[in-house]
Image (cartoon, helix red, strand yellow):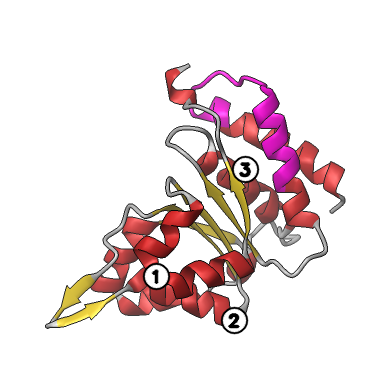
Amino acid sequence: MPEEDLAAGLYAAYRVEVEHRGRQFVETPELESQIRRMAHALTAPNQKYGLMLCGPVGNGKTTFIRAVQKILNMCNLRTEGEYPEDYRLAMVDSKVLAKTYADNIDEFNRLAGLIMLAIDDLGQEPVELQMYGNVYRPIVDLLGRRYDKQQFTMITTNLAPNEIGEIYGGRIADRLAEMMDIIVFENSSYRRM
């Protein structure tokens, strides 16, 4: 899809998501810039295979991922109107991923292996889990696997890019920098508008 078409689609899908949440859509220069940067990151011929949206709470990162999810999933519709599971963008909260690791490792492995995955609110989950005397780092494991397989991954986080290494280690921070275009959202919370 050409960059301009994707930007127009993102704009429309974002507007629908905002209104679906019962909020008033407000067009701002920051929003236009974010749409352009996301459309460019998703269409540019580069070596990146992911996108990380960083910034303070309430400024539209999750809403953007939902808009991208709708566009990607609509592009992958089958003629009979069903989404092929393997080619949908699934979005999972980081806390849910950590809990799934502890409660249902098979489901965690299925999610980790999806072709396209969006992780919402990275940094809100417990980084380490203790199970039967062993310490596990499910998100570190998941991100490492996705890096190795070069699977498309999107992330929203309230962490600044330099905080990723402090929490998940330098290895993951370095891999995320290689695999992802990073877009920093600097606008204030829309929830206060």
- Compared to residue 75, the image places residue 111 above or below, namely below
70 falls in the magenta region: no
The label number, if any, that marks residue 130 in the structure image: none
Q: CA distance from mark 2 to mark 3?
A: 25 Å
Residue topped by disc 2: 149
Disc on the earlier residue, 2 or 1: 2
The amino acid beneath tag 3 is Ala
Disc on the earlier residue, 2 or 3: 3
- Compared to residue 16, the image places residue 10 above or below, namely below
Circles 2 and 3: CB atoms closer than 8 Å: no
| Viewer-closest of 22 and 159 | 159
Q: Residue at x 53, y 41 (%)?
A: 61
Residue topped by disc 1: 169
Residue topped by disc 3: 67
**Around disc 1, counting alpha carbons within 10 Å, would you say few (fewer than 14), some (14 to 19), or many (20 or more)?**
few
| Viewer-closest of 79 and 55 | 55
How would you classify the magenta stretch by its main secondary structure? helix
In the structure shown, which secondary structural element does the residue marked by tag 2 occupy?
Answer: helix
